[in-house]
Amino acid sequence: MATNRVKMRLSGTEQELQAWLNYLKLLQDKEHIKMYGDEKLYAGRSDNDTYRCYVEVDLLI
């Protein structure tokens, strides 16, 4: 099985990021991807409503 790892930087509101992380976890549960990283949310530098997080994802083909 080949893997293709990418580094992802997600940016959005806290709720948007939680929705995306939940979706990625669902894909991981279905063994479509393998996710690495701490999924920690970091506050945006210029906007109080914006957060970002960093994850690495292997696409399992």
Image: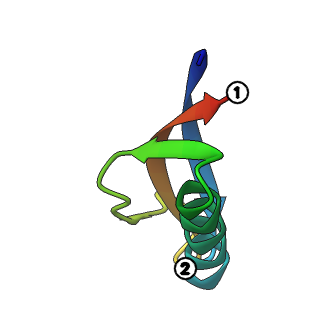
Q: Is residue 1 shown above or below 11?
A: above
Q: Earlier in the sequence, mark 2 or mark 1?
A: 2
Q: What residue does disc 1 label?
A: 61
- Residue 8 in percent (x, y) is at 57, 38
- Residue 55 in percent (x, y) is at 46, 44
Q: Looking at the figure, which quarter contains the N terminus?
A: top right
Residue at 63% over, 32% down? 59
Q: Is residue 2 shown above or below 11?
A: above
Q: Nearer the viewer, residue 59 or 17?
A: 59
Q: What residue does disc 2 label?
A: 14
Of badges 2 and 1, the one in the foreground is 1
Q: How many marks?
A: 2
Residue at 59% over, 70% down? 17
Residue 43 occupies which quadrant of the picture?
A: bottom left
Q: Looking at the figure, which quarter contains the C terminus?
A: top right
Q: Are marks 2 and 1 in contact (CB under 8 Å)?
A: no
Q: Amino acid at mark 2?
A: Glu
Q: Amino acid at mark 1?
A: Ile
Q: Nearer the viewer, residue 39 or 45?
A: 39
Q: Nearer the viewer, residue 7 or 46?
A: 7
Residue at 61% over, 84% down? 15
Q: Is residue 34 shown above or below 53?
A: above
Question: Badge 2: few (under 14), some or many (20 or more) residues near its Cα, within 10 Å?
Answer: some
- Residue 39 in percent (x, y) is at 38, 59
Secondary structure under tag 1 reads: loop
Disc assigned to residue 7: none
Secondary structure under tag 2 reads: helix
Separation of disc 2 and disc 1 at Cα?
30 Å
Residue at 59% over, 43% down? 33
Residue 38 occupies which quadrant of the picture?
A: bottom left
Which residue occupies the extreme front position in the image? Answer: 1
